[in-house]
Amino acid sequence: MSDTTLKTPLKVAILGAKGYPYVYGGYDTLVRELGERLIKKGVDVRVYCHKALFDEKPPVVNGIKLHYIPAIETKSLTQLTHSFLSMMHACLSDVDVIFVVNSGNGPFGLLSKIFRKPTAINVDGLEWLRPKWRGLGSRYFRFASRLATKFYDKVVTDSDEMHRIYLEMFGAESTVIAYGANPANHSNPELLKKWDLKPYDYFLIVGRLIPDNNADLILGGFLRSNTKRKLVIVGDVPFEDEFANKLKNIKDERVLFTGYVKDPEELKSLYNLSYAYFHGHEYGGTNPAMLKALGYGCAILALDTIFNKEMLQDGKHGLFFKKDFDAVTECIHHVEEMPEKMEELRKIARSGLIARYNWDNVTEDYLKLFLKLKGSKKLRRSKR
């Protein structure tokens, strides 16, 4: 893919995540990887940050201009109030394009319509189906996702399946731009000693301890198995939670909860030296944890969903299990009997990171989209 050359200045505001360089989830990583690459291409990038999350508030980091916006700090209002105020600020600024992440910010596209600012929104996954958003929260996300297709100039989905779903549910076309990965070929077995682990002597789960990631399903199936390997669970939730606490209170000498692993070298080694990586994420398109597993050379065992099948190319780069305790148990017994297949999957994992999962290509696609949006604004002005 050839690099796009900027012929005129381009100013882009990015909002809806926690900020920069704060990295906790997929959106924050997208902001970091995209923002840093756009700066190198000569784009003026401004990122809106949650003020409460930053003790130090430098105005510029790595060339990215930062705006620290307050919010009403409650579990249900923090994100919405922060995004509303950020959108107002961006609309009143001189940016050429506003890029928003999270379909929950769909209603705020009305502000950009009023101020005639070109916009794009990355809607991510099927938020309204996630168990944590039952009831009013689920209805809000579905409503907000529909409004995103009405108020924003361009909707971005990160997989072909998400493109199909938005077309069928909302009658809305979208631009498919996947999430990127940073593959690595080496890891350090010595780092495993921190948890008294040996290479290929454990299964791995990485992700937040929330119901739709199905750690309870995988853990339950694992406990029924007769494997002598361990199950290492990396991740937690940043708040007191009954579901997460119930999992962490399970006592079995084969089960290890590490909590968050913030050292990237330690996390890479845990991925790379696992016997197999369990991926139980149920909703959403291109998943960052799955991309890490491919990039770090894992043998992947994934929940049988349309999204996981797309990412693993219908089984070329992994095996699938049904949403059932017995299916997980059978999967464990099955893969332990075929170490050669696991080794083969580890060897070909990185080849699963096709061009669409390359951060440079992802950035190029976004840059072309932003330039097109800026051009459409000029066209509208010339017709008036």
Image: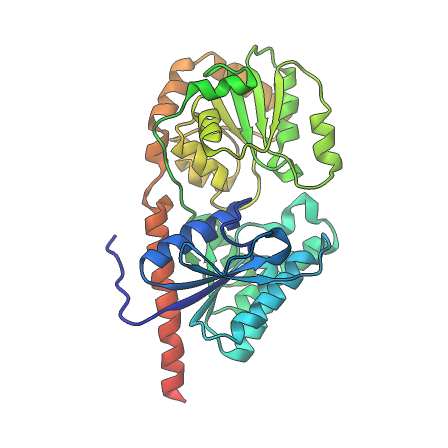
Asked whether 327 or 255 is in front, the reply is: 255
* Relative vertical location of residue 212 with respect to residue 195 in this rendering, above or below: below
Asked whether 7 or 262 is in front, the reply is: 262
- Residue 27, image x and y in percent? 52, 50
Image quadrant where one finds the C terminus: bottom left
* Relative vertical location of residue 94 with respect to residue 293 in this rendering, above or below: below
Task: Give the quarter of the image for residue 96.
Answer: bottom left
Q: How many marks?
A: 0
Q: In this orientation, does residue 319 appear?
A: no
Residue drawn at (50%, 33%) of the image: 263
Horizontal side of residue 320 vs 362, given as left or right: right
Horizontal side of residue 35 vs 121, given as left or right: left
Residue drawn at (41%, 22%) of the image: 188
- Residue 228, image x and y in percent? 57, 10
* Relative vertical location of residue 40 with respect to residue 236 in this rendering, above or below: below
- Residue 97, image x and y in percent? 44, 69
Asked whether 373 or 263 is in front, the reply is: 263
